[in-house]
Amino acid sequence: MSSPVQSDARRSHWGEPPWKIDFRPSRHPIPERVDVAIVGGGFGGLAAAAWLRRIAPHKSVAVFEAQSIGSGSSGRTGGMVLAETAAGDLPGLGDVLAGFSSTLRELDIECDLQLPGAFEIGRSGHLPNSPIAWQDSGDLRATAEVPGGTINPGRLVSGLARAADRFGAFIIENAPVNEIRHADSLRLRVREREVRASRALIATNALSLELNGLAKRTEPKLTLVVATTPLKPADLEVLGLASGRPFYTVDLPYLWGRVFHTNRVIFGGGIIEVNNWRDLESIDISNGRAAELIAKIERRVRGLHPALRSIGFSHRWGGPVLFGHNWEGKPVFEAHPSLPNAITLGAYSGHGVALSVYLGRWAAEAALGRKALPSW
Ligand SMILES: Cc1cc2nc3c(=O)[nH]c(=O)nc-3n(C[C@H](O)[C@H](O)[C@H](O)COP(=O)(O)OP(=O)(O)OC[C@H]3O[C@@H](n4cnc5c(N)ncnc54)[C@H](O)[C@@H]3O)c2cc1C
């Protein structure tokens, strides 16, 4: 399996979100051998590393991250916390929100988690008492309230990495895994070195799709986001956002968002299609189609409500998401199709904040043979 990735350490051409990842892992040499190798330093890989060392402190664990922790989806996400999966509940899934919350507690992670619920919004089927009353291709109002809430993504990436480091996992940045093969053990090619591992968890999500075995089954995309300048509390009130509930449309055109602290509102909506995951790496959000789509989101936001008519925008960014074919929404969490003792985890279809942490913990238990993989 080979999948070279590029090496701009922060993927700055995808723009900057309004939070910081304030943890930098200590430097470690690339080990010759580990019990468990984790590929990808996003929510999924970091949660698995922290949990593995917490429950099996005698096992050596290394996270290999191609660039810097959180430089894929996790540091760029909207940070809306949602229940279940994009395909709803699945057999044996369990309670994602409860498992996510308890994992954060048990790993001692503070990431501004709030679970006031979330609004589904739409152009028909409105709730009679909808606090949201916007215009966007029709009357946009709340249609349902569902379980959910928000986190600060910078704090969640930092908190998971800090926990993994504290429990003794090695997190090695600028360490792209370019190939994994099997010859008596797993052998990972990392920066021209070979690492032997008894087990591997591949949590590269929308990138390195040959490595995680998902190239033929999934569609990588770049999704675009903007953050407004801070609003007055009275404006959040008239917008129906004062309760802190995030929102997402259940019909098209798609729009989602949330309030971030200091009263900025984050809005997302545009998606860039690519033929190959490598094309994601070369998208510069300040040019071409991405810049056009961002300008379109900003126009839409200003048209939603008079309180937003002359709002400014302080941050613009994009990040990768991985969908299954036909927008089915089932995440992938299974034995790797061609590598023994390796698990593939990802393809959350834009619904992976709570789920990647929840399944990352489960993957740690599966790698130790303490819990079975699901059969979705
Ligand atoms: C803009 C945006 C908004 C979103 N909003 C929401 C939301 O509000 N709610 C929600 O639930 N979900 C949302 N999502 C989805 C959610 O953020 C992701 O599902 C989740 O972060 C996935 O985490 P991950 O660890 O699987 O992947 P990632 O965070 O992408 O981590 C994968 C890591 O693997 C690394 N990597 C890739 N290839 C290699 C290699 N060969 N060797 C070593 N490392 C490699 C990458 O650099 C990356 O850091 C959003 C996503 C985006 C992009």
Image (cartoon, helix red, strand yellow):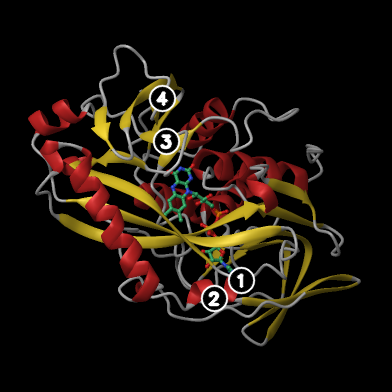
Name the spot of residue 13 as percent of width and height, x first.
Answer: 36, 75
Q: If you read the primary sequence from the N terminus, does the residue marked by circle 4 or circle 1 appear first?
A: 4
What percent of the width, then of the height, locates residue 291? Answer: 32, 69
Q: Which residue is mark 3?
A: 249
Residue closest to the far right: 184
Q: Which mark sits nearer the N-terminus, 3 or 1? A: 3
Disc 2 crowd, CA 10 A, few/some/many (<14, 14-19, 20+): few
Circles 2 and 1 in contact, beta carbons < 8 Å: yes
- The quadrant where residue 315 appears: bottom left
Please give the residue where the numbered disc 4 appears in the rendered image. 124
Pick the front one: 336 or 296: 296
| Pick the front one: 164 or 80 | 80
Q: Cα distance, mark 2 to mark 3?
A: 28 Å
Q: Residues within 10 Å of mark 3 (few under 14, many from 20)?
A: many
Spatial separation of the CA atoms under disc 4 and disc 2 = 37 Å
Instruction: Name the N-terminal-most of marks 3 and 4.
Output: 4
For image coordinates 72% across by 70% down, the residue present is: 210
Horizontally, residue 239 falls left or right of residue 232, namely: right
Going 40% across and 22% down the picture, which residue do you hit?
Answer: 143
Helix, strand or loop status at disc 3: strand
